[in-house]
Image: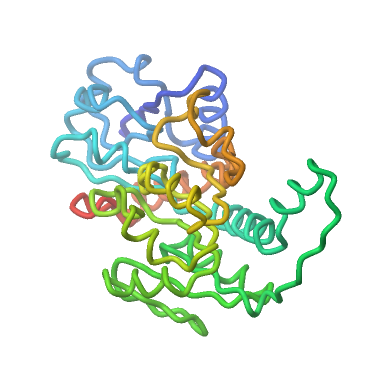
Amino acid sequence: MKAPIPFIHRLNEDEERHWLSLLSQKLPDETILPLNKLSQAEREFADIAVVANPDPQDLECLPNLVWIHSVWAGVERIVRELDAPTFSIVRLVDPELSSTMAEAVLAWTLFLHREMPYYAEQQRTAVWQPIPYVAARDRTVGILGLGELGRASVAKLQASGFNVIGWSRTPKTIADVETYSGSEGLEETLKKSDILVCLLPLTSETEHLLDFERFGFLRPGARLINFARGKIIDDEALLYSLNTGQLQHAVLDVFAIEPLPRSHPYWTHPNVTVLPHVSAATTVSSASTIVAQNIRNYRYLNILPKTVDIQIGY
């Protein structure tokens, strides 16, 4: 007899219904229920849980958990809030999410490459002044983070003719891409980048990775795109770099506090574009398909998906 699978989350009621409907459709042989619908015996029997930023106390009432499947790609909040979990954590790896992120990286790289902020300001002041065109091949885009999202973004940028380089915590090889790793490699990547794109996971090592010192390594007039996590950037350092001209423009989709407080200087800074965390939203349909297949592999083949390394945070 299979144990029911609890769905544990901090979503609203409509989001809960949507996830439960699709997961149940794709796992017709399973019983998937909100935690509050499970009896005490069912909670003690459960070995799998599907989660969306769960409350750690909710997981503590499932003593026989073997693993949990997050429906988000980012799991830093789960890792931070759980105290020495006895179960494994699986994060969402969704090719559709990677494609959506790569599309956003290309779109906003082109926004900066083709000088859209400059021309928008000219329109506001009724100025007619073209600036010289720079070919994509002469623009170096540095990607921080070479996991699934980073690799998809590299491929999309290369297809559009950009010179792409990349940095990761550990050495990685990508065809026709100059890659770097470690602290010295990070410095080199920053020094060579005209447009810097951050796609790193948030860990204890990457929190405030982009600080006063590292922004100083960038070429004067470089541009920044952060589609990773807000806390990777030191906000004071970024504002200083923008105000001094070290950075020309920043496109920010993620923030230390979300929604971004109305009083935050990013809202009104002339060289900042604020986005409401929209670069790569999870697609419930494709995500639920992947979650369902991973659960079937575990049930019938005893195959556990790749799990998160708690020590490094992803």
| Quarter where residue 66 is shown | top left
- Foreground of the two, 305 or 41: 305
x then y, percent, for residue 52: 41, 33
What residue sits 44% from the left and 72% below the top?
166
- Foreground of the two, 295 or 118: 118
Query: On the picture, is 85 further left or further right than 94?
Result: left
Query: On the picture, is 115 further left or further right than 76?
Result: right
Residue 253 seen from this side? yes
Q: Does residue 27 sit above or below 136 in this rendering?
A: above
What residue sits 35% from the left and 45% below the top?
234
x then y, percent, for residue 11: 46, 23
Q: Does residue 198 sit above or below 90 in this rendering?
A: below
Of the 4 image quadrants, the one containing the N terminus is top left
Q: Does residue 218 sit above or below 292 in this rendering?
A: below
What residue sits 59% from the left and 33% below the top?
268
Residue 285 seen from this side? no
- Foreground of the two, 196 or 49: 196
| Quarter where residue 172 is shown | bottom left
x then y, percent, for residue 206: 30, 53
How many tags in the picture?
0
x then y, percent, for residue 35: 35, 20
Q: How is the image coloured?
A: rainbow
